Amino acid sequence: RFRTALGPELDRLAVAVAALPRVLCLRDYQSQNLMIDAAGRLRLIDYQDALLAPAELDLAALVFDSYLELADAEREALLARYWQARGSAPDPAAFALLTVQRKCKDYGRFRYVTEVKHDVRYGPFIERARTVVLGALPRLPEAQRPLAELLRVLPIDVALEIAHELARDAALVAPVVVEEGAVVWHQHPHEAP
């Protein structure tokens, strides 16, 4: 019953995200993949899953990084700095959409690794991901309010587990493939050939 109600709402989330402009994203842009080398330069690692996605995907992954705690004031300062550097007005709706998508994915991954693979290192991050999803729900655009309501009224563990199962990265982003040293941009799945 829950899947029947949640599935179409997650499809609407995917369509809303797919309609956003896309840029090259790391997909896993978080503290453990950002390194400072001996010369003090920032280096990115773990970028083999790079893809075309809304810029807010990497932004949500970074400012709601499960592996470190930021005070709300620090997060707001980082967001303000990002939007200033980008030279455009913030898009709170897009940011909320991508925050819900990214953190549902994190929640499911952390539960799977902890409960199925028995890797308890990820256990502490389950509640952080859940808290971020719940915090982002009120900022979703009007068209996604039914999703927000479903996630609020269902037992949260059931809702997030279903959301993680049903969310498909392929429906949200366009894959990027490196072929013979060149980046090949693949067409987004929601676009006609």
Image (spheres, rainbow, N blue to C red):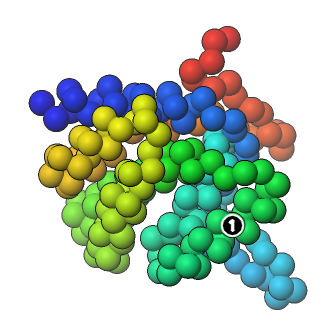
Where's residue 124, x and y in %? 32, 76
The residue lying toward the viewer, choosing from 151 and 44, is 151
Q: Residue at x 40, y 28 (%)?
A: 11
Question: In this rendering, is residue 115 above or below 55?
Answer: below
| Whether residue 176 is visible | no
Q: Quadrant of residue 9?
A: top left
SS of the residue under disc 1:
helix
Q: Residue at x 59, y 71 (%)?
A: 76
User: What residue is disc 1 on?
Assistant: 80
Question: In this rendering, is residue 123 above or below 57?
Answer: below
Question: In this rendering, is residue 56 above or below 52?
Answer: below
**Can you say which quadrant of the picture contains the N terminus?**
top left
Where's residue 25, x and y in %? 68, 50
The residue lying toward the viewer, choosing from 166 and 39, is 166
**Can you say which quadrant of the picture contains the C terminus?**
top right
Q: Is residue 89 left or right of residue 97?
A: right
Where's residue 128, x and y in %? 36, 70
Where's residue 143, x and y in %? 42, 31
The residue lying toward the viewer, choosing from 21 and 77, is 77
